[in-house]
Image (spheres, rainbow, N blue to C red):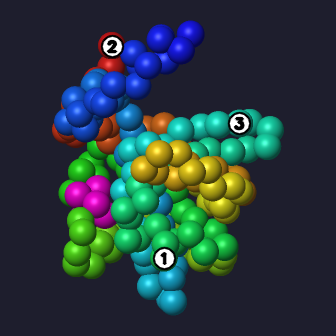
Amino acid sequence: MEQAQAQTDVALHPAELRRVFGAFPTGVTAIAALVDGSPVGLAASSFTSVSLDPPLVSVCVAHSSTTWPLLSGSARLGVSVLSAEQELACRQLAARDGDRFASLQWRATDDGAVLVEQASAWLDCSVEQLIRAGDHDIVLLRVHELDADPSVPPLVFHASGFRRLEAA
């Protein structure tokens, strides 16, 4: 067993990890809230459903994020599943500088969650638990409200690029 463990602990190059991890297509979300009255947010493709009872989802956030520390103390976080038409919005939300919400249509809930308009789906969440995992934190979120528009196709991230779903 020890020898098998030693074989799996070889250092893997980050570029190779990104290439292989990128073979799995994901949706793209905006995680956002009001902070001191202004919208603050980030783009995340590491979003997934976790549990129906209780209703939980998760997102992974890099320890190097300068935005997550601003969001982490928010009472509520909005999760918007970006639509196929929102590639530019995603790039803007992922930018390292500038006003990430300039020209974006959004709304805030009474509890301060920020939701991007014209998204495929939205969830109003609160942080349930934070789990340290390597160079990221897994943020477990409890869902309080949600909705989706099945007529709005999602934005898909695959192989380091944006894609659109096509009916089979």
Pointer 1 local density, CA inside 10 Å: few below 14, some 14–19, many at least 20: some
Image-based side of 167 in relation to 128, left or right: left
Of circles 2 and 1, the one toward us is 1
Label 1, on which residue?
A: 70
In magenta, the rendered stretch is: 89-94
Which is more N-terminal, label 3 or label 2?
3
Q: Vertically, is 74 above or below 165?
A: below
Of circles 2 and 3, the one toward us is 3
Q: Does residue 166 appear in the picture of this structure?
A: yes
Q: Residue at image x 23%, y 75%?
A: 97
Q: Vertically, is 62 above or below 104?
A: above
Question: Residue 51, labelled with which disc?
Answer: 3
Amino acid at the residue labelled 1: Leu
- Do the CB atoms of the residues marked 1 and 3 lie less than 8 Å apart? no
Residue 72 drawn at (x, y percent):
56, 69
Give the secondary structure at mark 1. Answer: helix
Residue 60 drawn at (x, y percent):
48, 49
Label 2, on which residue?
A: 168
Amino acid at the residue labelled 3: Ser
Pointer 2 local density, CA inside 10 Å: few below 14, some 14–19, many at least 20: few
The Cα–Cα distance between marks 1 and 3, rounded to whole angstroms, is: 26 Å
